[in-house]
Amino acid sequence: MKNAIVRQVQGMAFTGKADSNHWVMMDGSIKEGGAAAATSPKELVLLGLGGCTGMDIASILKKKRARISEFEIHIAAEEADDFPRIFTKIHIEYVFHGENIRPNDVEHAIKLSQTKYCSVTAMLRASAVVSHSYRIENH
């Protein structure tokens, strides 16, 4: 079982921690009555998605001895017009920088993350269309 606790700090600002025992700040936008002083909960969902799939892929490519010097994940999401304004479409672009990076290795790592390992992708796929692409920038 996973556990988490979230506490109101002030106004729309909240802090929370889960089993790792690291506190994370959250806040709403000024339009929503917050101070825009921290990442919103919805933004944290996208960051969690990027971190989840990124860690999978970094681990797989390390085992394949890929020479990655820099790795970025760009995520674009569309949300429903009506509340609860869930994400309806999410596109993940993986960008790899390095030397002699093999496309087959990248494609295999992405496939494993998207279909087997990334639990955040699996959860979001229940309500959104999740797509992906990648670019390799060899040096």
Image (cartoon, helix red, strand yellow):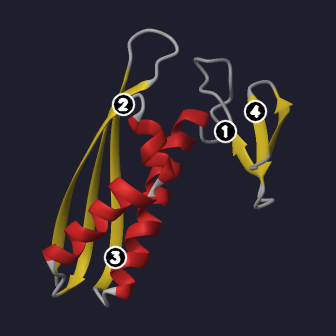
Label 3 CA crowd tier, 10 Å (few <14, some 14–19, many 20+):
few
Q: Amino acid at mark 1?
A: Ala
> Please, what secondary structure does the residue beneath circle 3 have?
strand
At horizontal 60% and vertical 41% (from top left) the residue drawn is 39
Q: Nearer the viewer, mark 2 or mark 1?
A: 2
Q: Which residue is mark 2?
A: 128
Q: Within the image, what quadrant is residue 28 found in?
A: top right
Which of 105/21 is in front?
105
> Which residue is at 37% across, 77% downward?
60
Which quadrant would residue 53 be assigned to in this image? bottom left
Return the disc, 4 or 2, that comes first in the chain's sequence. Answer: 4
Amino acid on which the number 3 mark rests in the picture: Glu
Report the Cα–Cα distance between label 4 and label 3: 33 Å
> Label 3 vs label 1: CA separation?
29 Å
Name the residue carrying label 3.
70
Dot label at residue 37: 1
Foreground disc of the pair 1, 4 = 4
Between circles 3 and 2, the one closer to the viewer is 2
Dot 2 or dot 1: first in sequence order is 1
How far apart are labels 3 and 2 at the CA level? 28 Å
- Camera-nearest residue between 129 and 134: 129
Q: Nearer the viewer, mark 4 or mark 2?
A: 2
Q: Do the numbered discs 2 and 1 sit on residues whose CB atoms are within 8 Å?
A: no
Disc on the earlier residue, 3 or 1: 1
Q: Position of residue 49 (x, y in %)?
A: 46, 50
In the image, which disc is placed on residue 13? Answer: 4
Q: Give the amino acid at mark 4.
A: Ala
Secondary structure of residue under mark 1: loop
- Counting residues from the start of the chain, the first of labels 1 and 4 encountered is 4
Left or right placement of residue 115 versus residue 101 in this view: right
* Mark 1 to mark 4 CA distance (whole Å): 8 Å
